Image (cartoon, helix red, strand yellow):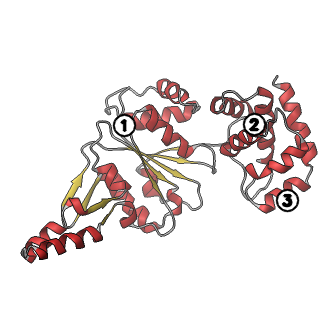
């Protein structure tokens, strides 16, 4: 499969899944299929799911297996076009104008030249549209749900035409459309118009067996017992009403923490002292510590024994 197949090329989910696996990213059949179709059709892909389930990592890994550049736009409340698309390098413009004044160049020449492309600060969106890569880059628009309605509306036009007009320069069109992946944690509902521009996939929490497989793929030398116990413990936490339920990334962080401490299996003492790798709020920590931590550890150890 090429880095960015043409719309007439047959999508191959099996190949995509296999190539992602070489980078220790385990995509289920649904995700592999929608990725393959997105590449074949050149359509943006919207990935939604809870925090820490691998949405951002999916885009990073895809860029790696396609041997192309990852361009990441991290969205946040109040993000605007200047931060996402382009801005002017005002300091460089002022230096240029002063140099022209010293040479007694005409003001009309200064005004014309000072708004040339060499004075543009290229932000992620312009970089993705006006790229010079041999293979189109992967544009990751991360946590789009954190941006406001105005920015979301701006993206609609951009994702439809992959072009942008800079008044002083003109319209810049993509020679090759980037591979676009948007992620959302659903902190707010996205507009239907944006969803219609994209293919869609929900990434949920994996089964226990799948999570064990992910842990062992990402941390190849981890003992099966520790991987299983940690995954079982974290999976049990997701059944609770927590402020911030732990994702796969927290499982991986915890396993690495336990290995750094030379632990081969869970114990109440070590779990209590390392829970900050799994739970990220005081309310969640207090609740888990106060509500049967020993019993939860015992259940996780039993799950580990069952998988040996």
Residue under the image location 36 percent in, 37 percent down:
41
Q: Are marks 1 and 2 in contact (CB under 8 Å)?
A: no
Kindly report the distance in space between the C-alpha atoms of the residues bearing marks 3 and 1: 48 Å
Percent across and percent down for residue 13 are: 48, 27
Residue under the image location 36 percent in, 58 percent down:
123
Callout 3: helix, strand or loop?
Answer: helix
Q: Mark 2 or mark 3: which comes first in sequence?
A: 2
Quarter where residue 168 is shown: bottom left
**Residue tagged by mark 3?**
286
Quarter containing the N terminus? top left
**Residue tagged by mark 1?**
41
Kindly report the distance in space between the C-alpha atoms of the residues bearing marks 2 and 3: 24 Å
Percent across and percent down for residue 119 are: 24, 63
Task: Between residue 276 and residue 301, name the one nearer to us.
Answer: 276
Task: Between residue 214 and residue 113, name the one nearer to us.
Answer: 113
Q: Residues within 10 Å of mark 2 (few under 14, many from 20)?
A: some
Q: Are marks 3 and 1 in contact (CB under 8 Å)?
A: no
Q: Mark 1 or mark 2: which comes first in sequence?
A: 1
């Amino acid at each position: 499969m090429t880095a960015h197949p043409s719309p007439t090329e047959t999508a191959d989910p099996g190949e995509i899944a296999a190539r992602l696996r070489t980078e220790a990213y385990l995509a289920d059949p649904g995700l592999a299929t929608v990725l393959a179709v997105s590449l074949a059709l050149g359509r943006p892909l919207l990935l939604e799911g809870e925090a820490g389930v691998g949405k951002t990592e999916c885009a990073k890994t895809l860029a790696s297996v396609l041997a192309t550049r990852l361009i990441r736009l991290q969205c946040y409340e109040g993000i605007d076009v200047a931060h996402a698309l382009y801005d002017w390098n005002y300091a460089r413009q002022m230096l240029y104008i002063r140099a022209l004044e010293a040479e007694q160049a005409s003001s009309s020449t200064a005004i014309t030249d000072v708004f040339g492309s060499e004075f543009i600060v290229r932000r992620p969106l312009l970089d993705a549209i006006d790229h010079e890569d041999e293979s189109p880059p992967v544009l990751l628009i991360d946590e789009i749900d954190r941006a406001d309605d105005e920015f979301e509306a701006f993206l609609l036009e951009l994702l439809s035409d992959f072009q942008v007009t800079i008044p002083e320069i003109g319209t810049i069109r993509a020679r090759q459309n980037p591979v676009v992946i948007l992620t959302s944690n659903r902190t707010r509902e996205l507009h239907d118009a944006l969803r219609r521009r994209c293919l869609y996939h929900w990434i949920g929490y994996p089964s226990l067996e799948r999570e064990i497989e992910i842990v062992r793929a990402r941390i190849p030398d981890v003992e099966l017992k520790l991987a299983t116990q940690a995954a079982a413990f974290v999976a049990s936490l997701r059944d609770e009403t927590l402020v911030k339920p732990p994702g796969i990334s927290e499982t991986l962080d915890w396993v690495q923490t336990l290995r750094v401490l030379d632990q081969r299996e869970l114990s109440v003492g070590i779990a209590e002292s390392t829970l900050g790798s799994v739970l990220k709020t005081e309310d969640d920590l207090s609740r888990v510590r106060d509500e049967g931590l020993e019993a939860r550890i015992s259940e996780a150890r039993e799950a580990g024994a069952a998988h040996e």
